[in-house]
Image (cartoon, grey):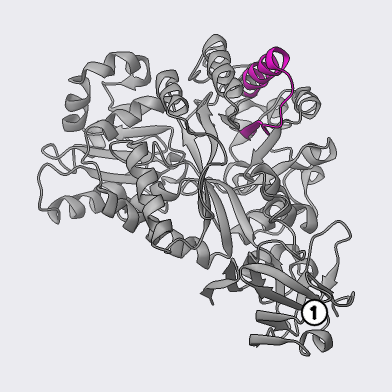
Amino acid sequence: MAEERGFISLFPNEEVGMDRIYYNGTVCSLDRENRRYTAIGTDNGKIKFLGSDEEALTYDAAEKIDLKGKVVLPGFVDSHLHMLNYAFVKMSYGMFGASSIKEIIHKGRYIDQNTADPEQWIYGRGWNEENFTDEKRPLTRFDLDKISVERPILFIRVCGHKAAVNSKAMAIIMGLEQTKDYIDQIDAENGILTEASIKLCYNIMKEPSVEEIKEMILTAQKDINAAGITGVETDNFLSLPGRNSERIMKAYRQLEEEGKLTLRIREQASFTEFSHMKDFIDKGYRTGQGGEYYTIGPVKLYEDGSLGARTALMNAPYVNSSEHGTTVHNQDETNNLVDYAYKNNMQILIHAIGDRASDMVCAAYEKAIEKYGMKDHRLAVNHLQIVSENLFDRMKKYGILAYIQPVFVASDKELVTDLVGVEAAGRSYMWKTMIDKGLVCCGGSDSPVESFDVLENIQVAVTRDKPGEKTQGWHPDQKLSILEAVRLFTVNNAFCAFAEERRGTIENGKDADLTVLEKDIFDTDPHEISKIKICMTIVAGREVYRG
């Protein structure tokens, strides 16, 4: 039974009228006292009433909706995904479930035979050599040449940090003037690209129009809303052929003007080169600019690659290797990027998976703060999969946020030790330690690398098991409580977006962004959390999904 705390209204001395009253449910506020109510009223996009059913039903409302015992939470938010790339992959060849190289070749031939335009690239993403049953190795151009030698092909690994191209595509790439700047990231003999060199293909492939981008946004938005998500932070600028940030922003703005956005979207403005970031900032773009549904978020930068691609930057070499991973920027370059963004009052989020990468990011942040003083920019590190022992203390000192993806544990836990060894594996995915150290941790999925299913992400954070698996959990001392895991995708994600006064908890006056579940997540077997049904997604008091 939900605890009933009595009627609370924005306007206690006025006649109360509301758009909607939801009653006969459990409303979990996640406020400082973690209050619960049985009814909630919304009006003009805001929460206007919290209290008991008896009190709620005495007030006028355009609609009175019986929740029939369902549970209301603050709207789920994903702090890091690639919304446009998710849609682009969905419209292309998604190979996330591919179990063999032979399967990829077979399906690729089918796509080739059913694509009329001989100049159109065959694009796919999601392959993972760890899932191959025939040969556990990366794809190469020799594999892709069996699909076509006439049509260029780009197949990106699940992580996004390694790709294979066929001979046709490699010939085109090697003929580009800018390729010389990325030659150390290209294995031309085998047709393998890593890190920023992958984006060379996006400079050649046909660029989508504004209308096509708008269709991609709406496609992704529909699926994201259905997952109970009311807001996202999305890294878009490098996600599509052309990498046209102005065109991408124009598409989002037009949809907002047309009243078609049903997500609160923060743009993680991603750049791999200083000149591109500087040009963006010099045009006057700043964190927080925008409307109710589309705003500029942090500058998004990259320090290294991924574990699976062995491009995450490590202090010690990978097992049975002399390689330490890939440095996207050296320390001076990282310092320069951070310095310019910080002094121009931009929030900054930097991708760092290996321990050496996050050390470098922290050093750049410390240097900027010492130079310009402490500002409330809510600097952040994205991923933090393997870390140095003192990193969290350094982050806590300067209030640096941790953007994390607990669902990665399910995918990587069986691989980490083989990649980096027992000692470094013991310093990986340390979500509980982060929270105990006082860091603000913001939950995300990195979709399409992983699913943006928030409930699955929460389940993995709590169990440290794969969905469908039931053990004591991998490194069980790092398990989160259900409340801690839920806060990653609600309270904490509001904070990282400077929106804690408007969202993240259910309180009067805040935006009516709500996620409605079929049952109480806090009273569910942790291994069954991902099976809870999403019943409704409500954004600004408007139902944008009903299951």
Residue 341: percent from left, percent from top: 55, 23
Looking at this view, is 533 or 294 the one in front?
294
Q: Quadrant of the N terminus?
A: bottom right
Residue 240: percent from left, percent from top: 33, 41
| Residue 191: quadrant of the picture | top left
What residue is drawn where x is 65% and y is 58%?
Answer: 469
Q: Secondary structure at mark 1?
A: loop
**Is residue 364 shown above or below 79?**
above
Q: Residues within 10 Å of mark 1 (few under 14, many from 20)?
A: many
Q: With 383 as the anchor, is 480 left or right in this view?
A: right
Could you tell me if residue 192 is visible in this image?
yes
Residue 132: percent from left, percent from top: 41, 45
Looking at this view, is 278 or 155 the one in front?
278
Count of picture labels: 1
Q: Quadrant of the C terminus?
A: bottom right
**Is residue 386 shown above or below 313?**
below
Q: Which residue is mark 1?
A: 38
- Return the residue found at the far top: 332
Looking at this view, is 92 or 162 the one in front?
92
| Residue 257: quadrant of the picture | bottom left
Q: Which residues are magenta?
A: 358-384
Could you tell me if residue 90 is visible in this image?
no
What residue is drawn where x is 57% and y is 46%?
Answer: 411
Q: Is residue 372 magenta?
A: yes
What residue is drawn where x is 55% and y is 64%?
Answer: 227
Q: Is residue 471 magenta?
A: no
Q: With 363 as the anchor, is 348 left or right in this view?
A: left
Q: With 157 as the anchor, is 480 left or right in this view?
A: right
Q: Amino acid at mark 1?
A: Thr
Residue 245: percent from left, percent from top: 37, 37
**Is residue 453 shown above or below 523?**
above
